[in-house]
């Protein structure tokens, strides 16, 4: 653990040193008008507001699940009689009703956030245009693993016994994990859209400032640095399996954003040649961190 922390300190220092280092790149050509890109910036901002709204509803849902978990813990400790446990289960049913209402009332600009009334499915796909040259980027927001059907399976399994309510704790934890994973997926989308908005803003506001290469190189470097930070976090040894999966979600989205920018501008990032980068185990993350630090260091030597 001490060795890992020392390595992290060294490579973080390399990132700081490399932060002002320009990356060699060919002259970029991105033939989008500032007017079009201004509209796309607004489109991205609209989607960011959607994701903020979805996160607010997920936070409300998570709070109620935590209340249910507290009830399960109380019912499992053996100090209540059967009548008291029936009352606890009644409270659980009231709470699951709150959860269902949260999902039902989760709307944004006239559209349900977590379901599609046209198909009856527990997810909704929201398209967002990132540039005129690309197919629409699709964001899926889902409640499939914690919808009304999942809640019913949970409540139907409960009985007014300490053992049943003890088992109920693990079932609530599974629902909480599903909500947390969905929230992490949305956070990954939010992180990517922040950089996509910066890219669109460069074209909307800086198109008359001469060569845009320096703007794109700075954007690439900022994404590279964020990717490196995620690798350092995963390598630190303080995260569990689910936490690393969440970090991987953001890593994947930002890595895809780097490749998108490269395709549009012709400017490669430091990490353009990484193959199937993984942060899912501490060993994978440590190897990725060292590899990425080496790339930062090589650019420093070139300059």
Image (cartoon, rainbow, N blue to C red):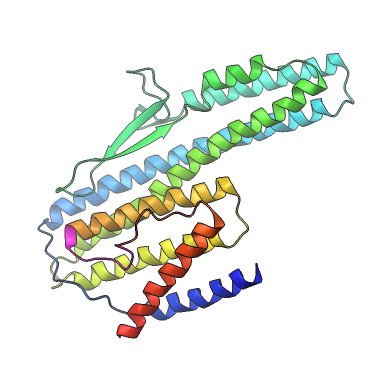
Residue in front for this viewpoint, 292 or 29: 292
Asked whether, in this view, residue 169 is left or right of residue 27, the answer is right
9 relative to 270 in the view: left or right: right
Whether residue 270 is in magenta: the answer is: yes
User: Quadrant of the image for the N terminus?
Assistant: bottom right
Where residue 113 appears, x then y in whole percent?
A: 40, 31
Q: Is residue 34 left or right of residue 162?
A: left
Above/below status of 279 relative to 296: above
Q: Is residue 197 visible?
A: no
Question: Which residue is pictured at 23% across the width and 48% down the height?
Answer: 130
Q: Residue at x 19, y 71 (%)?
A: 213
Stretch in magenta: 264-272
Q: Nearer the viewer, residue 139 or 110?
A: 139
The overriding secondary structure of the stretch rendered in magenta is: loop
Q: Is residue 155 left or right of residue 195?
A: right
Give the percent coordinates (x, y) of residue 186: 43, 43
The residue positioned 38% from the left and 40% from the top of the image is 50
């Amino acid at each position: 653990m001490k060795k890992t922390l020392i390595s992290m300190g060294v490579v973080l220092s390399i990132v700081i040193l490399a932060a002002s280092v320009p990356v060699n790149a060919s002259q970029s050509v991105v033939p989008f008008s500032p007017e079009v890109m201004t509209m796309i910036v607004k489109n991205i901002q609209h989607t960011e507001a959607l994701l903020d709204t979805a996160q607010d509803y997920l936070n409300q849902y998570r709070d109620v699940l935590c209340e249910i978990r507290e009830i399960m813990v109380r019912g499992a400790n053996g100090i209540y009689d059967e009548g008291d446990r029936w009352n606890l289960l009644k409270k659980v049913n009231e709470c699951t009703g709150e959860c269902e209402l949260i999902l039902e009332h989760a709307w944004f600009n006239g559209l349900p956030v977590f379901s599609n009334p046209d198909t009856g499915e527990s997810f909704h796909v929201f398209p967002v245009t990132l540039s005129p040259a690309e197919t629409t980027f699709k964001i899926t927001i889902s409640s499939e693993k914690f919808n009304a059907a999942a809640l019913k399976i949970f409540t139907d399994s409960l009985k007014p016994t300490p053992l049943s309510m003890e088992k109920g704790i693990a079932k609530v934890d599974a629902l909480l994990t599903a909500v947390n994973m969905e929230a992490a997926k949305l956070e990954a989308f939010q992180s990517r859209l922040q950089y996509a908005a910066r890219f669109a803003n460069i074209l909307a506001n800086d198109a008359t400032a001469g060569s845009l290469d320096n703007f794109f190189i700075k954007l690439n470097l900022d994404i590279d640095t964020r990717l490196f930070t995620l690798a350092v976090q995963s390598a630190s040894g303080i995260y569990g399996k689910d936490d690393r999966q969440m970090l991987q979600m953001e890593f994947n989205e930002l890595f895809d954003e780097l490749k998108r920018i490269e395709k549009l501008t012709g400017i490669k990032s430091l990490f353009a040649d990484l193959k199937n980068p993984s942060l899912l185990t501490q060993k994978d993350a440590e190897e990725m961190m060292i590899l990425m630090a080496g790339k930062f260091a090589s650019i420093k030597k070139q300059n």
